[in-house]
Image: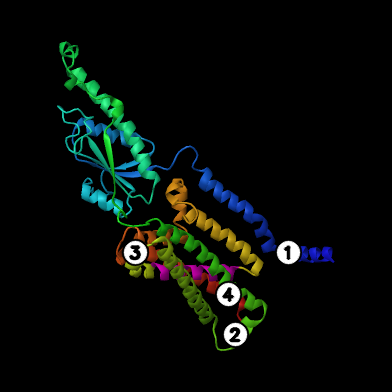
Amino acid sequence: MILAIVRTSILALLRDRGALALNFILPLALFSIFALVFGGRRDSTPRVKVLVVNQDTSAFSQRIVTGMKQAGSLDVRTRPDSINGSAQPEYTIATATAGVREGTAPVAVVIPPGLGDPGVEPLAGSAGHGEIRLLEDISDPVAPSVVSGTLKIVTMRAVLEDRTDRLRDVPDAAQHRPETPAETPRLADEGIAVVANNVVGENKRNPLISFYAAGIGVLFLLFSASGTSAALIEESDNGTLDRILSSRVAMTSLLLGKLTYNSMLAFVQLVLMFIWGWAVFKVDLWTHIPGFVVMGITTAVTVAAFGLFLASLCRTRAQLGAFSYLIILAMSSVGGSMFPRYLMPAAMQKAGLLTINAWAIEGFTKVFWRDEQIIQLWPEVSVLLAAAVCFLVVARVAVRRWEAV
């Protein structure tokens, strides 16, 4: 009897060639995706984009900027990108701070005026002089460490070069004159003081929990939408779909009805998740209600449309299960739900922009972390809604096979 059950199950799987292929392709595909995400990092982290404000015009400060540009770990920007071919002014403290808050870069470096004054030892390290400031966005915990470590090396090299140049310009007799204790410079390994300032989320009690809530929330919403959309296949198998279509309900109305229900369900799931985050993990929810509602509804509609898209392409529930796992896990790994995108190779970060996860997470980050206004969510909302329309159009075309001739 047991062998007969096994034989029957094997025959059923063999008849469903789509499910058969996906069940064996799925592990290989997921392995390849994670190998690209994690293995592609190799021996270095991705280059960190850093904004530089050089308030000092000396050769010494220029050495620091040049050294940062030559560092393989940094992508140094001293001015915003050109607009319509017109060069933009160099960064100031105000524009660099705004850039960090808006997510243009995770770190800005401010070189103060007078750092390389000819008569001043560049290792003074006292407050306000010889002090380089880092303006940080700590939602990316890796970038400040990379920039700080690179600065230590660059400034050390600049100090030694500056000291060599000064000695070269001094007459030989003065070079051999004994130095008094007051004239003895500090050792180069003391370095220039680097002071870090968090300019994003500094007043939040538990700032990163909202980021994780968005990432994990989108992941499970995708799985949930796939599961609820499977009702289309079940209704087709048990004949319910034929009875619905034989009435006055058109297929377009049926899809829109399911889209509305699945969107409402997904939005309620998001609300419960963020309320739980507020109650247990102190997520600052209530001051961000407008932005949360906009991003929540947009994300819910998009994942609901995506679920209908997946269901419309599959013939059986087994196919849908394997296919949805493959697509959703791939999207979530590349899109940032399972691993921060800023730690991925540059190519994988760009690939993440093809996923629902990346745009939804960026939108929620703008709301809960950067405190941006609703109008500033238009890129994320536009992309997500456009994707929802595309998913729904493809689903409508694909479900023609279920309509009565």
Chief secondary structure of the magenta portion: helix
Residue at the (48%, 52%) spot, across then down: 339
Quadrant including the C terminus: bottom right
Q: Secondary structure at mark 4?
A: helix
Circle 3 SS class: helix
Q: Magenta stretch: residue 329 in it?
A: no
- Tell me the distance, in whole angstroms, between the alpha carbons under discs 2 and 1: 29 Å
Residues in magenta? Answer: 295-313
> What type is the residue that disc 3 sits on?
Leu
Binning the other alpha carbons within 10 Å of mark 1 as few (below 14), some (14 to 19) or many (20 upward) gives some
Name the residue tied to disc 1.
13
User: Where is mark 4, residue-wise?
Assistant: 399
Crowd rating for badge 2 (residues with CA inside 10 Å; few <14, some 14–19, many 20+): some
- Toward the front, the furthest residue is 280
Residue 58, position as x, y percentages in the image: 19, 32
Q: Earlier in the sequence, mark 3 or mark 1?
A: 1
> Residue reaching furthest right?
1
Q: Nearer the viewer, mark 4 or mark 3?
A: 3
Q: Nearer the viewer, residue 372 or 231?
A: 372
Q: CA distance from mark 4 to mark 1?
A: 24 Å
Q: Relative to 101, does residue 311 appear above or below in the rendering?
A: below
Residue 315 pos. (x, y %): 64, 70
Residue bearing the label numbered 2: 244
State the separation of the CA atoms marked 4 and 3.
33 Å
Q: Label 4 is placed on what type of residue?
A: Val
Mark closer to the chain start, 4 or 2: 2
Q: Is residue 351 above or below residue 168?
A: below
Say if mark 3 contacts mark 1, CB within 8 Å: no
